[in-house]
Image: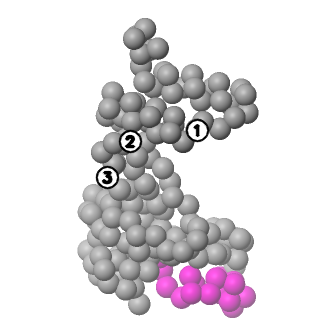
């Protein structure tokens, strides 16, 4: 198809539509080939969000966004009272900042892993972190009382978070 003037992106879209119409998954080797072709043709990265699961994850990347005003009480619709604090546990004991961190795309497929994670605000300020700064984080999943999992930063640039 590429010889007929179709772009790698267009070919990927056709394959995805056909697989969906037939209710079949795209074989891993085919998906990788399509992604590699598209990345080599366009240079555009594919961002994949890594959701909290299993054990911890190590990620090195740039801080692309931050939210300095995380309020777990509002997010979970709890009142800031002894019961709400008991439900939140350690998340109610200090202020947190939400960070989005993205890895550099891999050279072959152009895939960039990205995570949304939480760090104590005091640590964020003490380290002087800023947008576009490269950091290495070890994150661990934390299940909130509503069943939602979030990533908490356990270590930053090789130093454990107290």
Q: Earlier in the sequence, mark 3 or mark 2?
A: 3
Which residue occupies 50% across, 39% down?
29
The answer to whether residue 84 is left or right of residue 123 is: right
Mark 1 is surrounded, within 10 Å at the Cα level, by few (under 14), some (14 to 19) or many (20 or more) other residues, namely few
Write down the residue under mark 2. 109
Residue 18 visible, this orientation: yes
Are the residues flagged by discs 3 and 2 in contact, CB closer than 8 Å? no
Q: Secondary structure at mark 2?
A: loop
Q: Secondary structure at mark 1?
A: loop
Write down the residue under mark 1. 27
In magenta, the rendered stretch is: 80-97
Q: Nearer the viewer, residue 44 or 5?
A: 5
Which residue occupies 73% across, 33% down?
23
Write down the residue under mark 3. 104
The answer to whether residue 9 is left or right of residue 131 is: right
Query: Would you place residue 72 above or below residue 25 in this image?
Result: below
Quadrant for the C terminus in the image: bottom left
């Amino acid at each position: 198809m590429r010889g007929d003037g179709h772009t790698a992106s267009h070919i990927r879209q056709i394959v995805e539509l056909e697989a969906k119409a037939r209710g079949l998954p795209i074989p891993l080797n085919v998906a990788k080939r399509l992604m590699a072709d598209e990345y080599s043709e366009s240079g555009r990265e594919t961002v994949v969000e890594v959701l909290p699961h299993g054990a911890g994850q190590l990620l090195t990347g740039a801080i692309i966004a931050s939210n300095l005003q995380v309020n777990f009480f509002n997010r979970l619709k709890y009142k800031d009272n002894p019961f709400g604090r008991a439900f939140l546990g350690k998340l109610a004991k200090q202020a947190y900042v939400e960070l989005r961190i993205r890895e550099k795309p891999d050279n072959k497929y152009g895939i960039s892993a990205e995570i949304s994670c939480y760090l104590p605000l005091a640590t964020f300020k003490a380290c002087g972190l800023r947008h576009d700064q490269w950091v290495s984080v070890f994150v661990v999943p934390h299940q909130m009382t509503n069943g939602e999992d979030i990533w908490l930063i356990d270590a930053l640039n090789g130093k454990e978070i107290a």
